[in-house]
Image (cartoon, rainbow, N blue to C red):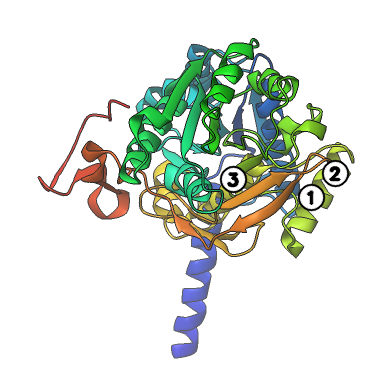
Amino acid sequence: MIRHMLCGGAAVLALSSAAAAQEASCPIKVGVLHSLSGTMAISETTLKDTVEMLVEQQNEAGGLLGCDLEAVVVDPASDWPLFAEKARELLTVHEVDVIFGNWTSVSRKSVLPVIEELNGLLFYPVQYEGEESSKNVFYTGAAPNQQAIPAVDYFLEELGIERFALLGTDYVYPRTTNNILEAYLGQNGVAEEDIFINYTPFGHSDWATIVSDVVAMADEGRPVGVISTINGDANVGFYKELAAQGVDASDIPVVAFSVGEEELSGLDTADLVGHLAAWNYFQSADTAANEEWVAAWKARMGEDRVTNDPMEAHYIGFNMWVQAAEQAGTVEVDAVRDAMYGQEVENLTGGTAVMLPNHHLTKPVLIGEITEDGQFDIVSQTEEVPGDAWTDYLPESAVLTSDWPGLGCGMYNTQTESCVQIQSNY
């Protein structure tokens, strides 16, 4: 009788697994929402290529839930309102099961109301300003405590920087990040007059005056450093102007948050050697997993193509989504979301990424120096740091916490013990 009960139970499990697999409508559609034209194409085209490669690899491994995956690609063309339209198109016309996309925070915030209205699922792969937690977004890039704050600490502790130029593109990510950094620098004894903040539009090309202003900061002999949140192709003109004015890393070091291997591939790096970037991944990371990833990428795309941090974020997010769908037995958004918490994927730099209840990852923080070949020499690497959706350095955010599976809330006020229903002003 026990044997019959066990056999019957196994049969039921087999049938239920088959039924779960049948819940997925084949093919399973993966939306790709990255700019293929406009000012952000320099950074985002590679991420479209990355998702297509991940889809191809998954299909070669047998697909998902008995189905092949299909990448559905749209071009929001670096047009922030168009991101919202294209997200709606992906969810309502193409009926995708998940979206991997966006770079700038302004594009993400454009998409946010659409995916929340339609209960879509977005994996966002780029470092950002934090101050947000949506149940429909998994943030696989760095929060400020996983990039911006450690970069400032490196300037303060390792390089002895005393005066700071915070240069950014004029939109939400640089402005919010610099609000956080200005508060953090103040708490670390940096005077207000020793912080220069400047914003320029997307695609800005005339950097002569701004670079001259930064150079002037160093005239009295105190060490000056640049924290760069300049985004997109504006970086080309910025670094060219640094070289034109004879500024190198030994004079005024720059640490960038949006310049990686892909951006450097379009620059003459001879005059940029020694300048820095803060990310959670560099192609030069010496691990077996990274060697395999880079080899697969170059085999598909060509030897001259490089890898970068947001690509690794998509690699981690995509594999977590696959694992969660397999665990849930469906690609239905609510079930996948519930299965996402605690998912683990190996970082390509070593260690393990874990998805937290606040929809952020644990990530190591890496500081890299630019080398002549357009790569980065890793000069600092931490253990995994848990991503913080709400910064500790702005009073209105310090009291907030995000816990979706426990509290069902992305903005829980620990003082009032209530869930805040409005988004931050930042």
Task: State which quadrant residue 391 falls in.
Answer: top left
Picture quarter with the N terminus? bottom left
Q: Nearer the viewer, mark 1 or mark 3?
A: 3
Q: Assess whether mark 2 and mark 1 are in contact (beta carbons under 8 angstroms).
A: yes
Q: Residue at x 66, y 48 (%)?
A: 368
Q: Which of marks 2 and 3 is in front?
A: 3
Residue density around tag 2, few if under 14, some if 14–19, many if 20 or more, within 10 Å: some
User: Residue 107's x, y, as percent?
Assistant: 49, 22
- Secondary structure type for disc 1: helix
Decide which of 99, 403 is in the foreground and name it: 403
How far apart are labels 1 and 3 at the CA level? 17 Å
Q: Residue furthest front?
A: 220
User: Residue 182's x, y, as percent?
Assistant: 37, 34
Relative to 350, is 266 on the left or the right? Answer: right
Decide which of 79, 191 is in the foreground and name it: 191
Q: Residue at x 9, y 45 (%)?
A: 416
Decide which of 107, 394 is in the foreground and name it: 394
Picture quarter with the C terminus? top left
Q: Name the residue under label 2.
A: 298
The answer to whether 103 is drawn above or below residue 181 in the figure is: above
Return the mark for residue 294: 1
Q: Which residue lies furthest to the top in this view?
A: 206
Relative to 178, is 304 on the left or the right? Answer: right
Residue type of the residue flagged with mark 3: Trp
Residue density around tag 1, few if under 14, some if 14–19, many if 20 or more, within 10 Å: some
Q: Residue at x 22, y 29 (%)?
A: 422
Q: Mark 3 points at which residue?
A: 279
